[in-house]
Image (cartoon, grey):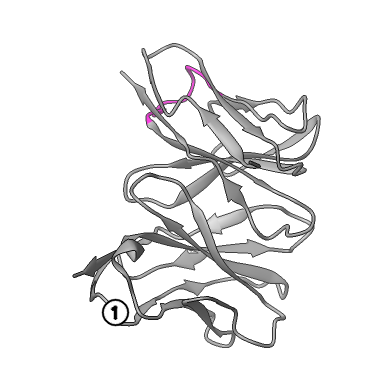
Amino acid sequence: DGGITQSPKYLFRKEGQNVTLSCEQNLNHDAMYWYRQDPGQGLRLIYYSQIVNDFQKGDIAEGYSVSREKKESFPLTVTSAQKNPTAFYLCASSGQSRPYEQYFGPGTRLTVT
Amino acid sequence: AQKITQTQPGMFVQEKEAVTLDCTYDTSDPSYGLFWYKQPSSGEMIFLIYQGSYDQQNATEGRYSLNFQKARKSANLVISASQLGDSAMYFCAMREALGRDDKIIFGKGTRLHILP
Protein backbone atom coordinates (compact mmCIF):
# COMPACT_ATOMS: atom_id res chain seq x y z
CA ASP A 1 0.00 0.00 0.00
CA GLY A 2 1.13 3.55 -0.74
CA GLY A 3 1.72 5.88 2.13
CA ILE A 4 4.09 7.69 4.43
CA THR A 5 6.03 5.97 7.15
CA GLN A 6 7.69 7.57 10.12
CA SER A 7 9.83 5.70 12.55
CA PRO A 8 10.02 5.22 15.39
CA LYS A 9 6.64 6.11 16.87
CA TYR A 10 8.21 7.05 20.21
CA LEU A 11 11.76 8.31 20.68
CA PHE A 12 13.60 9.21 23.84
CA ARG A 13 16.88 11.12 23.97
CA LYS A 14 19.10 12.84 26.47
CA GLU A 15 19.51 16.57 26.30
CA GLY A 16 22.48 17.61 24.18
CA GLN A 17 22.19 14.75 21.71
CA ASN A 18 21.24 15.15 18.08
CA VAL A 19 18.48 12.86 16.88
CA THR A 20 17.25 12.08 13.36
CA LEU A 21 13.62 11.32 12.59
CA SER A 22 12.93 9.37 9.44
CA CYS A 23 10.19 9.98 6.89
CA GLU A 24 9.70 7.81 3.82
CA GLN A 25 6.96 7.96 1.21
CA ASN A 26 6.16 5.70 -1.73
CA LEU A 27 3.48 7.94 -3.22
CA ASN A 28 5.82 9.41 -5.81
CA HIS A 29 5.14 12.85 -4.36
CA ASP A 30 7.50 15.70 -5.14
CA ALA A 31 6.82 17.83 -2.07
CA MET A 32 7.51 16.83 1.53
CA TYR A 33 7.09 18.68 4.81
CA TRP A 34 7.96 18.52 8.47
CA TYR A 35 5.63 19.90 11.15
CA ARG A 36 5.89 20.18 14.88
CA GLN A 37 2.85 19.92 17.15
CA ASP A 38 2.83 20.90 20.81
CA PRO A 39 -0.01 20.02 23.22
CA GLY A 40 -3.15 22.00 22.50
CA GLN A 41 -1.57 23.62 19.47
CA GLY A 42 -1.90 23.39 15.74
CA LEU A 43 0.88 22.33 13.43
CA ARG A 44 3.86 24.57 12.79
CA LEU A 45 6.00 24.15 9.69
CA ILE A 46 9.67 23.36 10.27
CA TYR A 47 11.03 22.68 6.79
CA TYR A 48 9.64 21.77 3.41
CA SER A 49 11.04 20.49 0.15
CA GLN A 50 9.39 20.79 -3.25
CA ILE A 51 12.04 18.87 -5.15
CA VAL A 52 15.04 16.63 -4.58
CA ASN A 53 18.17 18.42 -3.36
CA ASP A 54 16.22 21.55 -2.47
CA PHE A 55 14.44 22.61 0.70
CA GLN A 56 13.21 25.76 2.41
CA LYS A 57 12.89 26.87 6.00
CA GLY A 58 9.45 27.03 7.50
CA ASP A 59 8.32 29.13 10.41
CA ILE A 60 10.35 27.41 13.14
CA ALA A 61 13.50 26.05 11.45
CA GLU A 62 15.99 27.07 14.14
CA GLY A 63 17.63 24.07 15.75
CA TYR A 64 16.57 21.69 12.98
CA SER A 65 18.17 20.47 9.77
CA VAL A 66 16.95 18.37 6.84
CA SER A 67 18.20 16.72 3.68
CA ARG A 68 16.45 15.61 0.51
CA GLU A 69 18.84 13.32 -1.34
CA LYS A 70 16.08 11.04 -2.60
CA LYS A 71 12.52 11.75 -3.65
CA GLU A 72 11.21 9.17 -1.20
CA SER A 73 13.06 10.35 1.88
CA PHE A 74 13.10 13.55 3.93
CA PRO A 75 14.84 12.98 7.28
CA LEU A 76 14.71 15.63 10.01
CA THR A 77 17.56 16.12 12.49
CA VAL A 78 16.73 17.74 15.78
CA THR A 79 19.98 19.27 16.95
CA SER A 80 21.15 20.14 20.42
CA ALA A 81 20.55 23.78 19.49
CA GLN A 82 16.78 23.25 19.58
CA LYS A 83 15.80 24.58 23.00
CA ASN A 84 12.50 22.74 23.44
CA PRO A 85 12.70 19.61 21.28
CA THR A 86 10.06 17.55 23.11
CA ALA A 87 7.05 17.48 20.77
CA PHE A 88 5.06 15.44 18.29
CA TYR A 89 6.61 15.55 14.80
CA LEU A 90 4.57 14.95 11.68
CA CYS A 91 5.84 14.42 8.17
CA ALA A 92 3.65 15.03 5.12
CA SER A 93 3.84 14.91 1.35
CA SER A 94 1.82 16.18 -1.58
CA GLY A 95 1.74 15.39 -5.28
CA GLN A 96 1.23 17.45 -8.41
CA SER A 97 -2.17 16.00 -9.22
CA ARG A 98 -3.69 17.27 -5.95
CA PRO A 99 -1.11 19.75 -4.61
CA TYR A 100 -3.56 21.13 -2.08
CA GLU A 101 -3.91 17.81 -0.28
CA GLN A 102 -1.17 16.78 2.10
CA TYR A 103 -0.85 13.15 3.17
CA PHE A 104 0.49 12.74 6.68
CA GLY A 105 2.55 10.04 8.32
CA PRO A 106 1.63 8.60 11.74
CA GLY A 107 4.03 10.91 13.55
CA THR A 108 6.95 10.51 15.95
CA ARG A 109 6.65 11.57 19.57
CA LEU A 110 10.06 12.80 20.72
CA THR A 111 10.85 13.19 24.40
CA VAL A 112 14.11 14.80 25.45
CA THR A 113 15.12 14.71 29.11
CA ALA B 1 -2.07 38.50 13.63
CA GLN B 2 -3.36 34.98 13.36
CA LYS B 3 -4.05 33.84 9.85
CA ILE B 4 -6.37 31.03 10.90
CA THR B 5 -8.66 31.41 13.91
CA GLN B 6 -10.67 28.64 15.47
CA THR B 7 -12.62 30.15 18.35
CA GLN B 8 -14.01 26.92 19.82
CA PRO B 9 -11.35 25.08 21.83
CA GLY B 10 -13.83 22.32 22.62
CA MET B 11 -17.35 21.21 21.77
CA PHE B 12 -19.74 18.59 23.10
CA VAL B 13 -22.43 17.35 20.72
CA GLN B 14 -25.05 14.63 21.00
CA GLU B 15 -24.67 11.73 18.59
CA LYS B 16 -26.66 12.09 15.35
CA GLU B 17 -26.84 15.87 15.63
CA ALA B 18 -25.22 18.14 13.07
CA VAL B 19 -22.04 19.97 14.09
CA THR B 20 -20.58 23.24 12.87
CA LEU B 21 -16.92 23.96 13.59
CA ASP B 22 -15.96 27.59 13.09
CA CYS B 23 -12.97 28.87 11.17
CA THR B 24 -12.07 32.38 10.06
CA TYR B 25 -9.03 33.28 8.04
CA ASP B 26 -7.04 36.32 7.07
CA THR B 27 -5.30 36.79 3.75
CA SER B 28 -4.81 39.47 1.15
CA ASP B 29 -3.95 36.93 -1.54
CA PRO B 30 -6.85 36.43 -3.99
CA SER B 31 -5.75 32.85 -4.64
CA TYR B 32 -5.84 30.55 -1.64
CA GLY B 33 -7.09 27.19 -0.49
CA LEU B 34 -8.83 26.17 2.71
CA PHE B 35 -8.71 22.73 4.30
CA TRP B 36 -10.02 20.79 7.21
CA TYR B 37 -8.15 17.93 8.85
CA LYS B 38 -9.21 15.49 11.54
CA GLN B 39 -6.75 14.25 14.14
CA PRO B 40 -7.92 11.28 16.24
CA SER B 41 -6.20 10.41 19.52
CA SER B 42 -3.76 8.21 17.57
CA GLY B 43 -2.17 11.40 16.21
CA GLU B 44 -2.52 10.86 12.49
CA MET B 45 -3.84 13.75 10.41
CA ILE B 46 -6.71 12.85 8.10
CA PHE B 47 -7.62 15.15 5.22
CA LEU B 48 -11.35 15.84 5.16
CA ILE B 49 -12.22 18.55 2.67
CA TYR B 50 -10.79 21.31 0.47
CA GLN B 51 -12.20 24.61 -0.81
CA GLY B 52 -10.45 26.80 -3.37
CA SER B 53 -10.96 30.55 -3.21
CA TYR B 54 -12.30 30.61 -6.76
CA ASP B 55 -14.63 27.64 -6.36
CA GLN B 56 -18.20 28.71 -7.00
CA GLN B 57 -19.84 26.04 -4.91
CA ASN B 58 -19.26 24.93 -1.35
CA ALA B 59 -17.22 21.75 -1.12
CA THR B 60 -18.85 18.55 0.09
CA GLU B 61 -17.37 15.14 0.91
CA GLY B 62 -19.89 12.65 2.25
CA ARG B 63 -21.05 13.87 5.66
CA TYR B 64 -18.64 16.81 5.54
CA SER B 65 -19.41 20.14 3.94
CA LEU B 66 -17.57 23.42 4.01
CA ASN B 67 -19.67 26.54 4.48
CA PHE B 68 -17.50 29.01 2.56
CA GLN B 69 -18.41 32.67 3.05
CA LYS B 70 -15.75 34.59 1.20
CA ALA B 71 -16.83 38.10 2.16
CA ARG B 72 -16.79 37.15 5.83
CA LYS B 73 -13.57 35.16 5.40
CA SER B 74 -15.06 32.15 7.08
CA ALA B 75 -14.79 28.47 6.21
CA ASN B 76 -16.86 26.54 8.72
CA LEU B 77 -16.92 22.74 8.65
CA VAL B 78 -20.34 21.12 8.94
CA ILE B 79 -20.61 17.47 9.92
CA SER B 80 -24.05 16.04 9.38
CA ALA B 81 -25.45 13.20 11.50
CA SER B 82 -22.48 13.03 13.87
CA GLN B 83 -21.10 9.66 14.96
CA LEU B 84 -19.08 8.57 17.97
CA GLY B 85 -16.09 8.10 15.69
CA ASP B 86 -16.16 11.80 14.87
CA SER B 87 -14.69 12.57 18.30
CA ALA B 88 -11.29 14.06 17.53
CA MET B 89 -9.35 17.29 17.08
CA TYR B 90 -10.27 19.23 13.97
CA PHE B 91 -7.91 21.67 12.31
CA CYS B 92 -8.71 24.36 9.79
CA ALA B 93 -5.83 25.29 7.49
CA MET B 94 -5.05 27.68 4.67
CA ARG B 95 -2.64 27.65 1.77
CA GLU B 96 -1.83 30.96 0.10
CA ALA B 97 -0.57 31.59 -3.44
CA LEU B 98 -1.17 28.10 -4.76
CA GLY B 99 1.76 26.88 -6.82
CA ARG B 100 4.17 29.54 -5.74
CA ASP B 101 4.56 28.81 -2.09
CA ASP B 102 3.82 25.39 -0.73
CA LYS B 103 3.12 26.33 2.88
CA ILE B 104 -0.02 25.51 4.76
CA ILE B 105 -0.93 27.42 7.94
CA PHE B 106 -2.93 25.60 10.60
CA GLY B 107 -5.31 26.90 13.23
CA LYS B 108 -5.05 25.76 16.86
CA GLY B 109 -7.86 23.29 16.49
CA THR B 110 -11.21 22.40 18.03
CA ARG B 111 -11.64 19.27 20.12
CA LEU B 112 -14.97 17.67 19.31
CA HIS B 113 -16.62 15.23 21.72
CA ILE B 114 -19.59 13.24 20.47
CA LEU B 115 -21.83 12.06 23.30
CA PRO B 116 -23.78 8.77 23.07
Total of numbered circles in the picture?
Answer: 1
The residue most toward the left is B116
Q: Is residue B111 something that shows in the picture? A: no
Left or right side of A30 for A109: left
Q: What residue is shown at x 77% (from left), y 43% (from top)?
A: A30
Which secondary structure dominates the residues rendered in magenta? loop
In percent of width and height, residue A3 lies at 62, 42
Left or right side of A48 for A63: left
Q: What residue is shown at x 52% (from left), y 86% (from top)?
A: B72
Left or right side of A82 for A2: right
Amino acid type of the residue tagged 1 in the rendering: Lys
| Quarter-of-image position of residue B51 | bottom right
| Quarter-of-image position of residue A69 | top right
Vertically, is B54 above or below A92? below
In percent of width and height, residue A75 lies at 62, 26
Residue B58 counted in the magenta span = no
Vertically, is A35 above or below B103? above
Vertically, is B44 above or below B76? above
Q: What residue is shown at x 30% (from left), y 18% (from top)?
A: A113
| Quarter-of-image position of residue A56 | top right
User: Which stretch did the figure color magenta?
Assistant: A77-86
Quarter of the rendering occupied by the C terminus of chain B:
bottom left
Label 1 crowding class (10 Å Cα cut-off): few <14, some 14-19, many 20+? some
| Residue that mark 1 sits on | B16
Vertically, is B49 above or below A35? below
Q: What residue is shown at x 42% (from left), y 12% (from top)?
A: A16
Q: Dot 1 lies on which element?
A: loop
